[in-house]
Amino acid sequence: MSNSTLASAEKRQHILSAALRVFFKYGYKRVSMNEIAEAAGISRPGLYLHFSSKEEVFRAAILQFADGLIEEISNGLHSRKTIEEKLRYAFEVWTVQRFDLTLNSPEAKEISDSSYEFAREALDQSYEKLESVLASILKGHVKSGGNQKTLSAEKMAHILTSAVRGFKLVAKSPSELRKLIQDLLGIILAA
């Protein structure tokens, strides 16, 4: 990677970090390209050199945010011993830590809702990355054999992430969300 490409990638990352701060502070709809540029310390035309629209910034910011969570999960897995501890840790980082924020912040809730509306593909890509991490954890649990009713690690990971996406809609507190996840893990790991 050339120095100019590296500098451009670093600048892009800086813009996305600034954009995330602005989105979390004001929500998606109230943020303009001017505010993103100002938060990043660049001109609006400079911002347009990297991103063509607020939606593009938002999609890229969602992916960067998710990549940070995946990195945090990956770095913390080695200190967890059992498959259940690893899975609970992954969901704690991915889902529970920010759940309270979403419940209590209209801006965070709007970001969550907007990600479905304006960044569905980025959101789906993020969950695919999480599923990949979960599948790698579950590979040690899945027994290979002739039983065709045994779910693959990938299928279990997909069921887990799909269910937890729904849990975020019905849980009323982080402790209720944790309990739902714990119960689901019990069911999946018993299968």
Image (cartoon, rainbow, N blue to C red):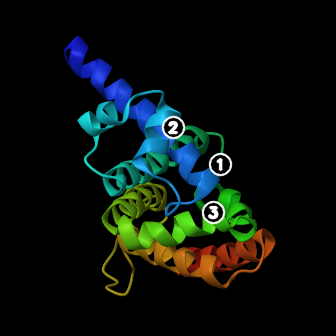
Q: Give the residue type at disc 3.
A: Glu
To which residue does mark 3 refer?
A: 107
To which residue does mark 2 refer?
A: 18
* Residue 49 falls left or right of residue 47: left
Let me know if residue 148 appears in the view.
yes
To which residue does mark 1 refer?
A: 81
Residue furthest left as drawn:
2
Which of the two discs, 2 and 1, sits closer to the camera? 2
Q: Secondary structure at mark 3?
A: helix
Who's the residue at 57% across and 73% down the image? 189
* Residue 92 falls left or right of residue 16: right
Mark 3–mark 1 Cα distance, whole angstroms, equals 37 Å
Who's the residue at 62% across and 76% down the image? 168
Position of residue 177 relative to residue 23, above or below, is: below
Position of residue 31 relative to residue 161, above or below, is: above
The location of residue 135, given as percent across then percent down, is 41, 61
Mark 3–mark 2 Cα distance, whole angstroms, equals 16 Å
Looking at marks 2 and 1 on the same chain, the residue that comes earlier in the sequence is marked by: 2
* Residue 147 falls left or right of residue 90: left
Mark 2–mark 1 Cα distance, whole angstroms, equals 36 Å
Residue count near mark 1 (Cα–Cα under 10 Å), binned few <14, some 14–19, many ≥20? few
Q: Give the residue type at disc 1.
A: Lys
Quadrant (top left/top right/bottom left/bottom right) for the N terminus: top left
